Amino acid sequence: MAWLVVRLAISLSLLYTASAVFEDQVGKFDWREQFIGKVRFALFDTHSQASKKLLVATDKNVFASLNSRTGDLFWRHVDKTGPEGHIDALLMYGQDAVVVVGNGRLLRSWETTVGGLKWEAVLDTGSFQAAALIGVQDFVKYVAVLKKSAISLHDLSSGSQIWVENLPDSDTVQYQTIYSGGNGLVFVLGFVPSSHIVIVEYKIEDGEIMKKKSVEAAWMSSLENSCAVISSGNLLCVDQITQSLYTLPLQSAEHTEMRQIHLQTLDLEVASGFQPVLTSTQPNPAQPPLAEFFLQLSPDHHILLQLKDDLIAPLRDFNPSYLAAFATSGEKTVAAVMTPKNDTACSINLFSADTGRRHLDTTIIYHMDPNGGKPNRLYVHAFLKKDDSVGYRVMVQTEDLTLTFLQQPGRVVWMREEALADVVTMEMVDLPLTGTQAELEGEFGKKADGLLPMVLKRLSSQFILLQAWMAHLWKLFYDARKPRSSVKNEVTIDTLSRDEFNLQKMMVMVTASGKLFGIDSKSGTVLWKQYLEDIQPNSIFKLIVQRTTAHFPHPPQCTLLIKDKDTGLGSLYVFNPIFGKKSHISVPALPRPVLQTLLLPVIDQDYAKVLLLIDDQYKVTAFPSTKNVLQQLQDTASSVFFYLVDSSQGKLSGFRLRMDLSTELIWEVVIPTEVQKIVAVKGKRANEHVHSQGRVMGDRSVLYKYLNPNLLAVITESTDMHQERSFVGIFLIDGVTGRIVHEAVQRKARGPVHFVHSENWLVYVYWNSKFRRNEFSVLELFEGAELYNSTVFSSLDRPHPPQVLQQSYIFPAPISTLEATLTEKGITSRHLLVGMPSGNILSLPKMFLDPRRPELISEQSREENLIPYAPEMPIRTEWFINYNQTVSRVRGIYTAPSGLESTCLVVVYGLDIYQTRVFPSKQFDVLKDDYDYILISSVLFGLFFATMISKRLAEVKLLNRAWR
Amino acid sequence: METRVGSRACACVALLLFALHASLGHEHIKLQEDEETAEELKLRAPEGDVRVQVSGRALVPGVRTQDWVAHARVLLDGDTHVGFIREDGGFSVSDVPSGSYVLEISSPTYRFQPVRVDITATGKMRARVVDYIRTSEVIRLPYPLQMRCLGLHSYFIQRETWIWSDFLMNPMVLMMVLPLLIIVLLPKVMNSSDPEMKREMEQSMNMLNSNQDLPDVSEIVTRFFSPPKSHGRAGGGARASVGVAQGVRGGASSVRGGAPRRRSKINTAVTSSE
């Protein structure tokens, strides 16, 4: 019965807090972009001419099919992260694609049209070496997987294992390649470094070893890139030290030594320090590979060679050339080579593989992005035209992970920015005002210069507004006549301006590959991009907005701190977030590792906020560091405090800034590392506003919030991971005085802990290892019925500790990230945004996480709108703000206030990017989009006509009465 | 084997009691962390190298499997283990170490009930109903798993559409319309029947009218222009935010309700005067 009452109360309260999406709002203000990551394997479906499929496997453990005409995803499969989902190989035959996953642990066959899984086979453990399709009599039937110590053969149609054989002497021999020419035999090639090559020959039917031989090869260091099998079973290897090519027929018994061909005899030379690469092609796995192959001699030198009658002859020398690739269509095999044209462009040409002759009119011009990286992979899709000549399209991948799909004569068909699959951090920046808006704003700022000029100015600005409006109307009218499809609201960098409610902003995104993006939040269009070269792959980024757009004519300014994870050395990159241009401001050199950054509210004469960088000797560097700034810093130094966290020693320390910009240690908190380690420290967001100082209770008294802006939440996890003894610790520490305001321990709990620290509350999620479920816990801090000092908060003068209330709840789903909504003035009620591994983003009202939720409903709690306590948190699909637009592998949620108090902008990033708006208290400050204009106007008109008619009738009646 | 079943049953009873206790809602502010069950120890016994394959079948009645499996995944405890669904609806998640997991099928379109899968240190498996509150209660489910679709996800809420019948059945409107009918129809009925009655009524009406003091025009004007009594701003702070949190609903309805209420008051005055 009690349950029923509680349930009823909850469902009633849900009616008020539900903030769901209406079906007609789909796509109105939200968008999603799906990404795949850095492409490792890409195969075009050459099965049929009309096929548009492009299969890709990426380093993000994603296997997907792209539409090669548009670049959109047909389907995508996201496997688990880490080595267990790593895609080792991708093979394609006909309608099926075979993928080897998890270091050769799983073999999956996918149907490529709809993306369904056909079969899945679990292989024995062992480190994966190679996989190949095996054909018998012009028909591909099997797939062979080579492990470090075993080889197995599987049926292509069912996945069942035909046989598995141990490799001979696998502890000494490194087996690396498989080769089959369709003649009923499988060759496994291995080698002993600096000694000899081992060739084992297996019979396809039963895995019987037919032959095993070893050939002397003292120069051998690796098989993988420097060897290839060409032209009916000839093994070809290249060696840099001896500057020679070596050949060996695999099947002949009499050859016991590799034939050496000096590169000098071919007038070739390998660039010093470069490991030469051999590339061969085997268009059909059931037939031997072609006799032609590419030899790469230096990073920009390829040569096409041919093996004919045991002689190697150069067909064509490509010097210089960046990339080369083979492609086959029908019976014809072609080679595409990318050569530099000038500084900004490359040309790609097609050559016939068997002669090396250039095909006429096949040039594709590839323009390199000046803000991007160099091309590093070339994928060619060749097809037969109607006149039986070969046409082709190419996909170019660059260092900055841009995929560009080109067709003749250089038209970019589509482009994908795959760097966005790995967004590290982001900020949202207001767009600048338009000229007219700035004019209007400027009118209020200036000093009054007489009545008449002001009137004139007012009139002129009104006139400008009228003009703009007329132009807008004209454009509407003009667009209405055009067909719908041709009208596109193209967003360009020049037309960017702030809208009425500041709902459209610039999303500045920093990706792990070191590429920066500026994205329009309304449409998701990439407006600018900038690739930062020579960024270490494991760098840490921190993005700081130093000057917003509010200080016209000073351009907005963002600073990116790039820090090397190993050395800790940092560098600053200053840019304009609207246009993406690098600023020419002199940046301080950072010779020592940076420990902490601090953005002060102090501004210099150019309205840029001052950034303090603290190095490992506790020295402070200010940026910008003009005289004005230093003067201001000296004045405010006594009130600048900062903290440092050293999680390896479990030490939190607080420092104070001295007048001369040196620092002074004022407190230290040591959390013993033997017991627990600090996993996260978070303060409150600097741009958050708290509207109300307290909460009105049922008896009309006020419970004041403890709003300490200097409060830090420190989360620790126990070092003992045993499920009985593990715990999660929470410390609330004042960042100025180092005083521990509150301390809580969650026993039998372990991480990962996600938490949000805001206003006077802290919400954290942990895993309860006893009951094996996720639990939410909320801590709220109150000062009590009276405020100690209502005007200003000072950490140094706080005699009374706050009252702390806490409650915990079960969350019946896994969690990947947690964030809270944020609005302009903090009037709107807060919601928590919970990212889940299933890809949904749940908007959970903070109302449910209120430690004052009563167990028993009383008159007062009803008055306060408190929901009765229930241990399990409800999850309703209506609360998923991204409906069916799931976001894979949510990494972070970014929230930003808009110009409307009711609206909070949300960006979810992970493998995908999703942008939307949420209205935690519904849209109370604008007319809802379902506002019934027709009803209102029809009622108005109806009333108007009714009065008219009744007036007329009354007149007639009066007249009649007068006549009587 | 039998002893194990016995201990399990004990644990169940204990936990049922505990659950009963919990449902009465006595001490749930901090989730309990007492009591120990034999169950736990067995499941969390030192994680050996046992790695098993969890398999089952997922079914969406009435939908071809090809149409939905491409967008669905099998997730164990979030995405610690991921599996894909075959074209025949079957699935298997391999290399799962011993422990207890919640297996769910994540599909953007179809809804499935999650299932808890327990794997012992020896590699034995069982499936049971997920219950986050009574975590050790065992309601067994068949293994290999049978995942049936429960329906579609409902992501959207219905718009409040404006329908004529809603408007007409509104009590305010009813209150307005019925007196109107009485005013219009009653005199007509009476008129034809009795002219004397009508005269009587008119007389009484006149008497009433003369007695009724008409509101002075000047008075109305002064009332209209005088500053409103101070009840706007004073609330401020928290009050305002509470108001906002309750939403516009209340406000709108009061506006909508306002006009008819006033009119109905006039109407009632007229009817009473009859």
Image: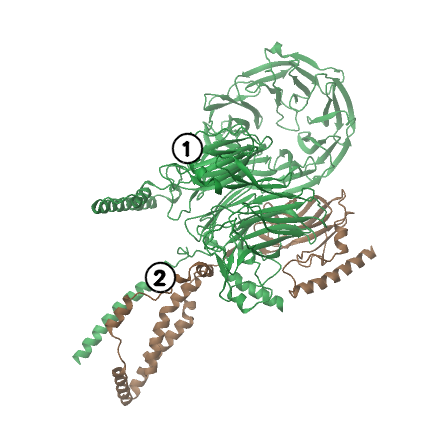
Chain colours: A green, B brown
Q: Quadrant of the C terminus of chain A?
A: bottom left
Give the x, y percent position of residue B90.
Answer: 67, 48
Can you tell which quarter of the image residue A273 is in? top right
Q: Earlier in the sequence, mark 2 or mark 1?
A: 1
**Residue extending farthest left:** A963
Disc 2 and disc 1: Cα gap in Å? Answer: 62 Å
Element at badge 2? helix
User: Residue A164 location in percent, x, y?
Assistant: 76, 34
Pointer 2 residue = A936
Regarding residue B179, the answer to whether it shows in the image is: yes
Q: Nearer the viewer, residue A812 or A154?
A: A812
Task: Point out the residue furthest to the top here.
Answer: A265
In the depicted structure, whether residue A581 falls above or below residue A357? below
Residue at 36 percent across and 42 percent down: it is: A433
Please, what is the three-letter code of the amino acid marked with disc 2? Ile
Residue that label 1 marks: A627
Of labels 2 and 1, the one closer to you = 1
The residue at 27%/81% (across/down) is: B212
Kindly give the residue lying farthest to the bottom in the view shown: B196
Q: Amino acid at mark 1?
A: Lys
Assign a secondary structure to mark 1.
Answer: helix
Q: Chain of mark 2?
A: A
Chain letter of mark 1 equals A
Name above or below for residue A162 compared with residue A294: below
Q: Is residue B24 left or right of residue A665?
A: right
Q: Mark 2 near mark 1, Cβ–Cβ under 8 Å?
A: no
Judged left or right of residue A680, residue A151 is right
- Disc 2 crowd, CA 10 A, few/some/many (<14, 14-19, 20+): few
